[in-house]
Image: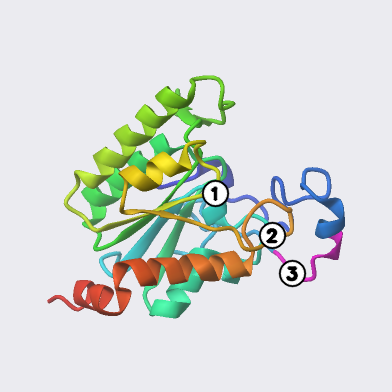
C-alpha cells in the first residue's frame, strides 16, 4: 500500500495529468504561469525525496492529487511547506485519483509498520471508491449521496479507532452537504482554496500556506508537536 507502482522509475517530466496544455482547466492561465514545475518520484512512486531510513520521527501526509501537488512546484506543495514551517520531515503520501478507501488502508499500514506519532490526512471526494485494488473516480450519481457519506464515515471512524494522532483535512467540494459535515464532525478541517495551480484546478502557494496555518492553528502544533516528538 505504501507504493504507487505506476510512478516508480518513470522519467522526470514537466507535466502530469491535468497539468498539461491539453487537459488543464484554463489554457490562458496555464500558458501565463511563471513558475517552473518538475515531477520527480522517489523509489516508492511518491512525489517526494527519498525517505529516511528512520521513520519514527516523521509526519505522514496522506492524500490525493491535491497532496501530490499537481500543477505546482514541489517545494510549494503543502507537505513540503509544512516541513519547512515546523522543522520535521513530512512524507508526501499523495496519489493522483486516490480514494478515501485507499487512504484509510494506507493509514492502517502506516500504523501497523511504523507506529507513527502523527498522520495528516487530506480526505478526497466521497464519490471515489477502491474496487479490485484500483481507485475508481465514479461520478457522484453512481452511488448517491447517502452511500457516499456512509462510505466516508466507515473510513473516517476506522482511522479514528486507531491509537494514533491524526489531523483530518477535507479538500474543497468533496461532498455536497458540507453544512452537515461541519455540524457533525468537529475535528474535520475544511480547506479553503485561495488560488489555483498551473492546471487551473489544484492548489497554488497561497492555499498551501493556508493549509499549513490551518493545521498549526487547530492542533496547537507549537506545544503539541514538540511534546509528541520530544518524548523519550
Labelled pair 3, 1 in contact (Cβ < 8 Å): no
161 sits to left or right of 40 = left
Magenta stretch: give its range.
Answer: 31-37
Q: Could you tell me which secondary element the residue under label 2 belongs to?
A: loop
- Which numbered dot is residue 172? 1
- The one nearer the camera, 58 or 145, is 145
Q: What residue sits right under mark 3 in the picture?
A: 36
Q: Position of residue 9 (x, y in %)?
A: 58, 51
Quarter of the image where one finds residue 140: top right
- The one nearer the camera, 130 or 39, is 130
User: Would residue 1 be visible to someone looking at this image?
Assistant: no
3D distance between C-alphas at marks 1 and 2: 14 Å
How many residues crowd mark 3 within 10 Å: few (<14), some (14–19), many (20+)?
few
Q: Position of residue 137 (x, y in %)?
A: 57, 31
Q: What residue sits right under mark 2 in the picture?
A: 197
- Which-is-in-front pick, marks 1 and 2? 1
- Which-is-in-front pick, marks 2 and 3? 2
Q: Could you tell me which secondary element the residue under label 3 belongs to?
A: loop
Q: Residue at x 24, y 58 (%)?
A: 165
Q: Residue at x 31, y 74 (%)?
A: 221
Amino acid at each position: 500500500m505504501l507504493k504507487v507502482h505506476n510512478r516508480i522509475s518513470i522519467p522526470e517530466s514537466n507535466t502530469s495529468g491535468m497539468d498539461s496544455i491539453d487537459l488543464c482547466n484554463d489554457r490562458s492561465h496555464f500558458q501565463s504561469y511563471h513558475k517552473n514545475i518538475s515531477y520527480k518520484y522517489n523509489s516508492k512512486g511518491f512525489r517526494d525525496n527519498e525517505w529516511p531510513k528512520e521513520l519514527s520521527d516523521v509526519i505522514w501526509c496522506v492524500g490525493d492529487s491535491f497532496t501530490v501537488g499537481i500543477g505546482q512546484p514541489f517545494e510549494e506543495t503543502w507537505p513540503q511547506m509544512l516541513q519547512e514551517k515546523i522543522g520535521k520531515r513530512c512524507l508526501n503520501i499523495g496519489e493522483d485519483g486516490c480514494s478515501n478507501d485507499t487512504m484509510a488502508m494506507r493509514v492502517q499500514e502506516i500504523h501497523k509498520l511504523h507506529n507513527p506519532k502523527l498522520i495528516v490526512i487530506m480526505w478526497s471526494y466521497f464519490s471515489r471508491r477502491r474496487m479490485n485494488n484500483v481507485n475508481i473516480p465514479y461520478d457522484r450519481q453512481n452511488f448517491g449521496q447517502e452511500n457516499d457519506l456512509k462510505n466516508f464515515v466507515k473510513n473516517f471512524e476506522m482511522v479514528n479507532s486507531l491509537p494514533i494522532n491524526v489531523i483530518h483535512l477535507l479538500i474543497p467540494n468533496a461532498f455536497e452537504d458540507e453544512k452537515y459535515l461541519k455540524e457533525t464532525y468537529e475535528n474535520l478541517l475544511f480547506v479553503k482554496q485561495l488560488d489555483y495551480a498551473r492546471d487551473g484546478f489544484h492548489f497554488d502557494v497561497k492555499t498551501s500556506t493556508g493549509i499549513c496555518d490551518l493545521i498549526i492553528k487547530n492542533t496547537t502544533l507549537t506545544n503539541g508537536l514538540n511534546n509528541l516528538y520530544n518524548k523519550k
